[in-house]
Image (spheres, coloured by chain):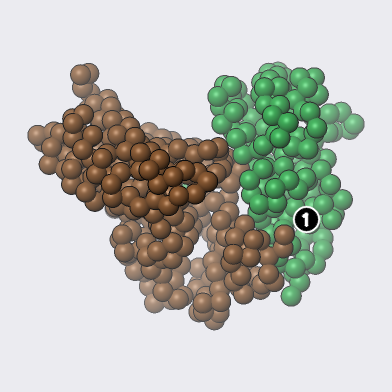
Chain colours: A green, B brown
């Protein structure tokens, strides 16, 4: 049986009838958000990472029907008015990508990391991004890009996404 | 990779979830974090006919000390624990686990109670729960049942839940001033199954002797194992290098690893020896710090 879902992606509502076994990654790609890359398709690589209600999740490991009524941010939602988000600028300037396949997931994980911890150490960045793999092994510049974006964002104090701030834990 | 087709039930309350489980019986599985279940379904290692999604239920996500124990709710995510002030300050061996379960993105969805219910042989929380002697609360339409962790773990991917029951909570002892522990694992890379891991917890009595020591191991048997002989080797005396060495050797002997791409049986036994040594040594350091000793 198909279920009707309404999922807000980058501030715009999408709607469809989905089979329960449809995972969010495929739903988003079918809805035109092809930045959501399928890498391992098995919860390992982080290429399909999106932000759901403020939390980074692997969209291959959540069913679309579970995202009904939720807010999703993909990398298409980061640039505002034709201007790149500071994290996108930083990945560009620091050459934080090689083939680019992992980049959308890498940047969205970085976004969630910086919302939780605006001033991370190198170790905290490496720990925070350890769920995202770069098969080009370009980690050095990815870390530099996140450090650079953290500095930039601290200066700007601008909202970093459509999402409410990532809650700092303790689930009560 | 698509899972086999299934029926999806969104439970908005515990009553709805229990009713759905009663209706569908053994065809139904509970969907909490889904970070093990969904991949298993996509590989078709699991093909439940019905998924009962408990995520919409309010009031199942909490970390709270209540009635002399620590209670963790069914929807408390690994990341809730990783970033909890209470856990980081007072439950260091749990913080050790929360820092290394799977990877940071998986930790945002996966739940502690779900990991224990799943009973994967390599599950970090399960080894930790054995060391801490945790109780599992199973809720059914007729009420709650308390199950000791040793009884809850039955075999690989098998627990003691009866049809119609859901794990709603795990109950952890609050460490007193003379209790501490440590959890350490060796993995090939973040997100891989552990090659081997060990969690330890002990309490010093008035004479400085260990009591109620718990030592859990994972990825070295059909499910997480209690190192009973190692516990006996530590209890009743102080945490000296010699006694730690004896316990580590006992644990290496009583674990039951299989050979796979992560290593041979002998290699994994040696990892357990090293991990138990290090975890007990770190526990001693933490106790010294906590109890204000400098030596």
Q: Residue furthest right?
A: A82
Residue B139, can we see it?
no
**What residue is shown at x 44% (from left), y 58% (from top)?**
B119
Is B219 positioned to the left or the right of A25 in the image?
A: left
Residue at 71% across, 67% down: A20
Q: Is residue A66 left or right of residue B33?
A: right
Q: For mark 1, does the 10 Å Cα neighbourhood hold few (<14), some (14 to 19), or many (20 or more) residues?
A: many
> Is B132 drawn above or below residue B270 in the view shown?
below
In-front residue for pair B180/B143: B180
Placement of A130 over or under B150, stated as above or below: above
Where residue B82 sits: x, y (%)? 48, 39
Q: Disc 1: which chain?
A: A
Label 1: element kind:
helix
x then y, percent, for residue A155? 70, 18
The answer to whether residue A37 is visible is: yes
Which is more toward the observer, B124 or B273? Answer: B273
B44 vs B78, left or right, is right
Residue, far left: B207
- Where does the image place residue A124, in percent across and percent down from the top left? 56, 27
Numbered marks: total:
1
Which residue is drawn at the image coordinates 45% and 38% (left, top)?
Answer: B186
Residue B100: image location, x then y, percent:
48, 39
Q: Residue at x 66, y 73 (%)?
A: B7
Quadrant assignment for the N terminus of chain A: bottom right
**Mark 1 sits on what residue?**
A26
């Amino acid at each position: 049986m198909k279920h009707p879902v309404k999922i807000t992606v980058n501030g715009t509502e999408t709607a469809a009838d989905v089979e329960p076994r449809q995972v969010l990654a495929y739903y988003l790609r079918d809805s035109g958000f092809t930045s959501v890359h399928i890498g391992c398709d098995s919860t390992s690589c982080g290429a399909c990472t999106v932000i759901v209600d403020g939390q980074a999740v692997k969209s291959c490991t959540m069913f679309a029907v579970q995202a009904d009524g939720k807010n999703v941010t993909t990398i298409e939602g980061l640039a505002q008015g034709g201007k790149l988000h500071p994290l996108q600028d930083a990945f560009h300037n620091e050459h934080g990508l090689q083939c680019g396949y992992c980049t959308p997931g890498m940047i969205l994980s970085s976004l969630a990391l910086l919302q939780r911890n605006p001033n991370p150490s190198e170790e905290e960045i490496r720990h925070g991004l350890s769920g995202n793999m770069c098969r080009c092994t370009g980690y050095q510049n990815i870390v530099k890009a996140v450090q650079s974006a953290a500095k930039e964002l601290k200066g700007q104090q601008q909202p970093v996404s459509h999402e409410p701030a990532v809650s700092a834990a303790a689930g009560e | 990779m698509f899972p086999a087709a299934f029926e999806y039930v969104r439970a908005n309350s515990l009553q709805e979830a229990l009713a759905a489980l009663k209706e569908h019986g053994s065809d139904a599985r509970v969907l909490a974090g889904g970070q093990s279940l969904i991949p298993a379904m996509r590989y078709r290692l699991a093909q439940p006919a019905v998924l009962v999604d408990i995520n919409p239920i309010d009031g199942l996500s909490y970390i709270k000390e209540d009635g002399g124990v620590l209670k963790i709710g069914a929807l408390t995510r690994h990341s809730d624990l990783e970033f909890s002030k209470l856990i980081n300050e007072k439950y260091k061996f749990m913080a050790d686990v929360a820092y290394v379960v799977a990877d940071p993105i998986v930790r945002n969805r996966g739940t502690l109670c779900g990991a224990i219910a799943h009973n994967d042989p390599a599950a970090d929380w399960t080894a930790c729960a054995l060391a801490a002697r945790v109780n599992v609360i199973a809720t059914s339409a007729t009420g709650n049942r308390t199950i000791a962790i040793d009884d809850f773990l039955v075999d690989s991917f098998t627990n003691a839940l009866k049809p119609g029951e859901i794990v709603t909570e795990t109950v952890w002892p609050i460490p007193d001033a003379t209790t501490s522990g440590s959890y350490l694992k060796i993995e090939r890379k973040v997100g891989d199954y552990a090659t081997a891991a060990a969690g330890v917890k002990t309490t010093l009595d008035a004479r400085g002797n260990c009591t109620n020591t718990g030592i859990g191991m994972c990825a070295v048997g059909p499910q997480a194992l209690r190192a009973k002989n190692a516990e006996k080797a530590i209890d009743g005396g102080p945490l000296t290098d010699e006694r730690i060495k004896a316990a580590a050797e006992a644990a290496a002997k009583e674990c039951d690893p299989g050979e796979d791409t992560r290593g041979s049986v002998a290699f994994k036994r040696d990892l357990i020896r090293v991990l138990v040594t290090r975890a007990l040594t770190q526990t001693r350091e933490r106790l010294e710090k906590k109890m204000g000793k400098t030596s």
